[in-house]
Amino acid sequence: MAIHRAVRLARANPQARVLLGSFSEPLSKALASKVAVLAPDTSEVTRRITTASFRGVAEELFQLVFSGRPRVASEKVIRDIVIETAREMNLSGFSDRFYVSEWSNVIDAWGVSSADEYMDIARMGRKSRLGPKQRERLWPLFEAVRKKLTASSYLTWADVFTQLASHLDEQGNKPFDHIVLDEAQDLGPAELRFFAAIAPDTTNALFFAGDLGQRIFQHPYSWKSLGVDVRGRSSTLKVCYRTSQQIRSAADRLLPLRLRDVDGLEEERSGTVSTFEGPMPEVGIYGDEHEERDAVRAFLSAAFEDGIKASEIGIFVRTPALVNRAQSAVSGISDSSDITIANMHLAKGLEFRAVAVMACDEGILPLDDRVADAADEAELDDVYETERRLLYVACTRARDRLLVTAVEPGSEYLHCPSSEHLALMAA
């Protein structure tokens, strides 16, 4: 939908500059290749469509506006600064995880810059309530963190988006005539403000394509509060052209029947149909990694025998540290270098005829480290839901064939039902 819309807008106006954006560089490159299919490289239409990741387009505009690339602090640098500062100030009553989470999900995400702003912010999605005295005690920590980042010439990505939004909001000459954003469910508050600020005040200026069931990066928040109200102006697509009926219906069991965002926009997942049939997805829980590897190799061999190319196969695992486990399954296979092997977060938006989702072990899905880092009950709930959605994303990359594997006892998501559906294992 996003690709077709971007090309249509570029064709409708011979002078239009169109941005087709998504959350990652790999996905933006995939979008660019598909734009070329609809509008060949020789076409002037292609030259007027910019495909880029959210951060990629922000970094480029930041360099144009401020004459230099932003020096963005890594998550580790930010975490270390927050924890170090909290200890220097001898704060008590909260955990290090809470301080880091509060900074990332409230202070930095919403650009809170003063004690008064912190007193008033709703802290949506956070169940650990903070009264005025607690916020008053916490604010010096976050103010000190901001000063340390500034002293080291560091910005956060939220800073980059916020500074650009402030600079470009009142500019009459916007960098693009039309902005089409894929994977919009994972836009953060600062990113949403940025794209709203650079969109011209004209028809078809800003278009979002997304799936609430694939929100794996962001805490829920109100788009309406930032001036972006899509209520009554959105549609849910009910025909799936990419994934077989068997794979799609099995993966849908990982999600609730209804999803609702903070603004009350409801997505009804029942009634969706796929346009083609395929084999039932396979789920295997094995005694050890060697048995799992042999099962994946058998799955790949069967795919090759049926004419599926190595370049049409993807293997996904939960974390980069598990990539070696996937690579061991393809070791010695001809053309194995053409098989895409990656962590699940990089699977978003990609498509393959056959997919193996490996290492869905207990402690991996949901990931123990994320569960341990949850700062409060709401964040813990969100961890469980986003981990479930992450598995959904990985599974739905498959068009025709899907294999999900684990070592005993396997992830709870392969055994336990979600709130309204049976689990994937029930398929």
Image (cartoon, rainbow, N blue to C red):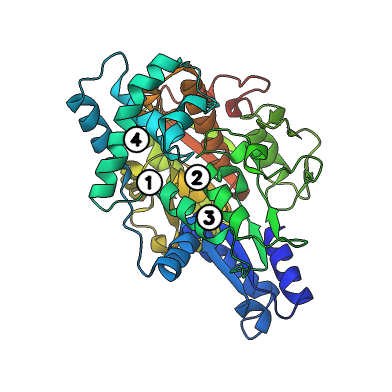
Which is nearer the N-term, disc 2 or disc 3?
3
Instruction: Say if mark 1 contacts mark 2, CB within 8 Å.
Output: yes
Q: What is the C-alpha distance between the residues marked 2 and 3?
A: 41 Å
> In this orientation, does residue 280 appear?
no
* Residue hosting label 3: 165
Residue ID for mark 2 = 356
Q: How far is mark 4 from mark 3, CA to CA?
A: 49 Å
Mark 2 vs mark 3: give the one in front: 3
Q: Does label 4 or label 3 sit earlier along the sequence?
A: 3
Marks 1/2: CA–CA distance: 9 Å
Label 2 amino acid? Answer: Ala
Lower sequence index among marks 1 and 2: 1
Give how far across and how far down residue 136 sits, in percent.
38, 21
Which percent across, then down, holds residue 206?
Answer: 69, 57
Mark 3 or mark 1: which comes first in sequence?
3
Q: Secondary structure at mark 4?
A: helix
Q: SS for tag 1?
A: helix
Q: Is residue 66 visible?
A: yes
Q: Quadrant of residue 388?
A: top right
Q: How many marks?
A: 4
Image height check: is 11 above or below 251? below
Q: Are marks 2 and 4 in contact (CB under 8 Å)?
A: no
* Quarter assignment of residue 248: top right
